Amino acid sequence: MSFLLLLTFLNLVFGSIVSKRSFDAKFAYTSVLSTTWSTFWHNEYQAFDLNDPSCNPNFSYAAVWDVAVAGKAIVDSGDVQKTTQVINSLYKFQNSEGWFTSSPGGSDIYTDDNSQVLWVFLDAYKLTQKEAYLNTAVNLMHLIQTQWSQIGGITWQKDATYVASISTTEAALSAVKVYEYNNDKTLLTFANSCLTWLDEHLTDPSDGFYYDGINKDTWQVNKGKLTYTVGTAISTYSYLYKFTGDATYLKKATKMASATLSSSTFLNNNGAWNNDLCYVHLLFCGFADLITIGGKTSYTSALVDQANFIYLFDKLDSGDYSLYTKAQSLYEQYVKITGDSKSVNYNYNPDNFCNGDVNKPRKSVLDDGSAAQIFYSVVRVS
Ligand SMILES: *[C@@H]1O[C@H](CO)[C@@H](O)[C@H](O)[C@H]1NC(C)=O
């Protein structure tokens, strides 16, 4: 399909359906937040469950990434009691060096997960003024900075060979967020170095987006692309603009933001961003930062429409979130409402359901937490 036809579809779904349906982001946010808690928080373990309890009644600890994503959405609600519970559950993942491992007591350490953990601690500090939370975040920042590789960029897994764009952009965003609290100017230099390195080594000139990463020993590049690297860079550039006043940063942020709305890389033919919720929520956060910190209010309506699309088409009957291209019931509903059976495909994958049963989409705390962050980003700009 040509890009002009694509834009016609964009009008069809976004123009006639999405933007004409009123969307109460505050309601969407608080609803999915309470569903997330009631579905996945386990009182006995005081932790989020990895499993969908309706698929598997046994508890397993959700991965630290999942906890950080859902946890940040909880902290942002301002609920101090639940914030304390989330923070205490995160501390179960911390090892003696200060890193947060993928599972409690485990040994896998991903630097991008640790950035997302850092953001939860900063937000929790902002809410509660507990110094321990700020100290945890600042120490984590220093640990993440030790992972600057010999070829530049931040290694994805601690001391390993793959240097990912996501670990590098998230380290940069962590740096500017920590700067806001401790005014350590070296953190601004560090954030700038991360983004400059990405410009030089991992940027696709055809759309301006980042490749997934590079092996520091073989220099082999993985050319996959995901929205979260771009969203995180937009956020970082917005903060750098705020702290330095340098409009070059704002220009870079708006160029990237506009590209996500015009390049086919991240758009489905119906005009909706095409990544899973866990990768796209940071693009929503990037837009919210660009609007609230960078003052670029012209992006508000695009942000609201993208979030409304998720609210209309990704919400399961239970109030949990999946993806309309993954859950058959959601796909059928999408086709029925829009009349569009061409611009996206649905492919059955048994892993997306409990025991492969299409009537039981598998829920996850990561999907729910990502949806909550998406709606919260709209609350921020409303
Ligand atoms: C839950 O745990 C029990 C006891 O260990 C086990 O027999 C059962 O297979 C588990 N259920 C699932 C769905 O994994």
Image (spheres, helix red, strand yellow):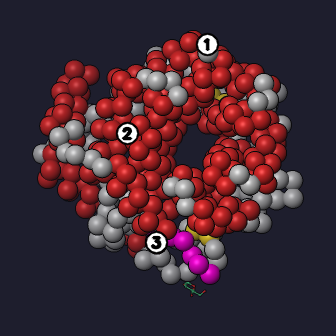
How many angstroms separate mark 3 from mark 2 (CA)?
28 Å
Query: Residue shown at 42%/77% (left/top)?
Result: 54
Viewer-proximal residue among 166 and 252: 252
Q: Which mark is residue 39?
A: 3
Tag 1: residue type?
Asp
Quick check: 43 above or below 206? below
Q: Which mark is residue 382?
A: 2
Q: Is residue 96 magenta?
A: no
Quick check: 349 above or below 171? below
Tag 2: residue type?
Ser
Q: Is residue 84 left or right of residue 139?
A: left
Span highlighted in magenta in the image: 39-44
Viewer-proximal residue among 30 and 316: 30
Return the x and y of residue 332 as percentages of the image width and height.
20, 56
Which element is circle 1 on? Answer: loop
Mark 1 closeness class: few <14, some 14–19, many ≥20 residues within 10 Å: few
Tag 3: residue type?
Thr
Return the x and y of residue 148 as percentages of the image width and height.
79, 32
| Quadrant location, ligand no. 1 | bottom right
Q: Which residue is mark 1?
A: 246
Which element is circle 2 on? Answer: loop
Q: Is residue 41 magenta?
A: yes
Query: Residue shown at 17%/40% (left/top)?
Result: 20
Question: Which comes before the other along the chain, label 3 or label 2?
Answer: 3
